Image (cartoon, rainbow, N blue to C red):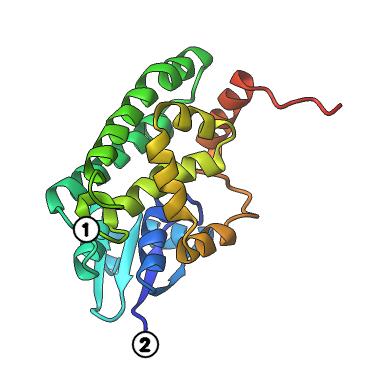
Amino acid sequence: MPDHYKLYYWPIPFRGHFIRYVLAHVGATWEETGFSEMGQFKNQPLEDKPYPFLAPPVLYDQGNDKYLGQLAAILMYLGRKYDLVGDQDEALRIINDALDILLEITRMHGAQMWDEQSWEAFVTTRLPAWLAIHERWLSEQTASSPFAHGRAKTGLSDLVLTALWHTMADKLPNMRDVITQHAPTLMAHADTVAETPEISAVRKDWETSATLYCAGQIEASILEMLNKRNPPHEPL
């Protein structure tokens, strides 16, 4: 019988896909919270929470009766549990890189909205710098094996990079071109992992979601910048 979990997170891709991809990859089952239930779970008094936390995601491992908070801790727990971690230090480094990038693309999780000048600087300087780092890292990691850390099969770092870059390419218009331009090996690797049956099934579940990426005003701000930089083609 597969391991079963409950994921306490908003029903959006963003940080949720990191956990969903790992659970899908290992064949686990899980249930999720809707917006209303997540809001109630998050905002209840601290003394009433089953686990002390400030913000989601939180994962409940039913088989071990264990709650975990913070995305990095959740991913490392799952990685160790399912033998997905080839090099713990490097795996944690890639997770922390991903968290930094999510913080940057959402301007401190929506503390500010994007303006054209700031967005142009991000997509022409800061984002390419991150992509170059991950392109080199992955190329070195896979020089003698198909996957990161010298593994012969998909591991935690591969799933994290896929949840980060493929989700961005998949959900944000025109971002695939930016990623591919600066990191073709990385984009191809993320595509390979994303096309496995387990991960593809998760992606299919989100094809009709009204939320493309991170929801709310910050998603609207990102989409506004993308459309201004690359306006949609007028129909002929």
Measuring from the top left, give residue 109's x and y in whole percent: 40, 36
Measuring from the top left, give residue 129's x and y in whole percent: 32, 23
Label placed on residue 76: 1
Cα–Cα gap, marks 1 and 2: 23 Å
Is 182 above or below relative to 188? above
Query: In which quadrant will I find the C terminus?
Result: top right
In this picture, residue 136 sits left or right of residue 31: left
Q: Secondary structure at mark 1?
A: helix
In this picture, residue 224 sits left or right of residue 167: right
Q: Residue furthest top?
A: 117
Mark 2: amino acid: Met
Residue depicted at x 55% and y 37% = 172
Residue depicted at x 58% and y 47% = 211
Residue depicted at x 25% and y 50% = 148
Q: Secondary structure at mark 2?
A: loop
Residue, disc 2 = 1
User: Label 2 near label 1: C-beta < 8 Å?
Assistant: no
Q: Residue furthest front?
A: 144
Query: In which quadrant will I find the N terminus?
Result: bottom left
